[in-house]
Image: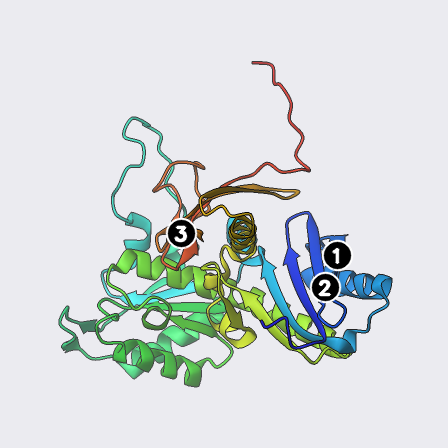
Amino acid sequence: MNVSTGGLRVGIDIGGTFTDLLVFDADAGRFHIGKILTTPDEPSRAVIDGLVATLSAAGLSSTAVRGIVHGTTLVTNAIIERKGAKTALLTTRGFRDAVQIGREHRYDLYDLFLEMPKPLVPRDLRLELDERVLADGAELVAVSPGQVRELADQLVAAGVEAVAIALIHAWRDPAHERQVEALLAEYAPDLVVSTSSSVVPEIREYERASTTIANVYVRPVVSRYLHRLEESLAALGVRGSLLIMLSSGGTCTVETARTFPIRLIESGPAAGALAAAEYGRLSGMSDVLSFDMGGTTAKACLIDAGRPLTTSDFEVSRVYRFKKGSGLPIKVPVIEMIEIGAGGGSIARIDAL
């Protein structure tokens, strides 16, 4: 967002404890900050209340806002707290348990009571289709519209809100996934659907399916939130652009965030890492260790040669915080950092041991 075009530019970060706001008045060259308690039941309320209070304290009008960049932990929290939509999986026959089996990797060889990450979709909602595409993209078994109709009726009867379509070798040829998606739109138009070939068009069915499930699991939650936020901003007279922070450090439109909310998995923390890199640059330091403590969590990130380290292999909702393989795999670009569940609002104590 170009800060030299006049008007007001607003940065908003929703954390687990506080919602922080920064308003830049480009005409006056001044910054104004605001902080308000986050409202978990309705996050947009804290955003609007905080924006109104910050602008009012500075004597500024919301109609002068030309652009907003927004970071949030909504996606992460929805997955960790299991507060997403009731979700089903449609996959190729014989592969319904791939998201349960995973890679058969024991992240702790010596733990006899090893607890594996629990899929976001229970087994009774992992449904199979009699279709098959080969590894080279050739069709072996065609999709049956009649079977898709039967499954659609089953999903509606079960009260399912969101559906992930993750068919074998769909990364090579997405035709079957697109056909099933179109049929679901016809037979059950109220279902929210994500296809693996659009979310993660890459090889490796486990990671592709897991990411697609997580994406559609949070889509209704994120869509409702963004809709309410847009309505509230419009009611304030805000006509500027609204951009959402991506986990990779970039930004996207509201429409992209609605379709691919999994890309926001580290939205808020990514913005903090970028800020640390920029402050390092301004201070003449290209190698920086950033530390970002909020009220609920604390994050550390390594800035190497002026840029935060990134990865496309991410895990969320780990059973054990620092054991790779104990969480749900997510294949999206993210800024790599270590995060712990202890922040400014945490209370430390010494137990009986």
Left/right of residue 169 with respect to residue 7 in the rendered view = left
Mark 3 crowd level (few <14, some 14–19, many ≥20, 10 Å Cα): some
Residue 333 place in picture, x, y as percent? 39, 59
Mark closer to the chain start, 3 or 2: 2
The quadrant the N terminus occupies is bottom right
Residue 52 place in picture, x, y as percent? 80, 66
Residue 129, which numbered label? Answer: none
Residue 115's place in the image compared with 225, above or below, is above
Q: Do callouts 1 and 2 mark residues in contact (Cβ within 8 Å)? A: yes
Residue that sits furthest to the front in the current view: 284
How is the protein colored in the picture? rainbow
Mark 1 crowd level (few <14, some 14–19, many ≥20, 10 Å Cα): some
Identify which residue is drawn at 68% across, 47% down: 17
Q: Nearer the viewer, residue 343 or 218?
A: 343
Q: Which residue is mark 1?
A: 33
Front tag of 3 and 2: 2
Residue 299's place in the image compared with 174, above or below, is above
Residue that sits furthest to the top in the current view: 353
Q: In this figure, what is the number of numbered marks?
A: 3
Q: Do callouts 3 and 2 mark residues in contact (Cβ within 8 Å)? A: no
Mark closer to the chain start, 3 or 1: 1
Q: Amino acid at mark 3?
A: Pro
Q: Quadrant of residue 181?
A: bottom left
C-alpha span from label 3 to label 1: 40 Å
Residue 271's place in the image compared with 348, above or below, is below
Mark closer to the chain start, 1 or 2: 2
Front tag of 3 and 1: 1
Q: Which residue is mark 2?
A: 23
Q: Which residue is mark 3?
A: 119
Residue 32 place in picture, x, y as percent? 76, 59
C-alpha span from label 3 to label 2: 40 Å
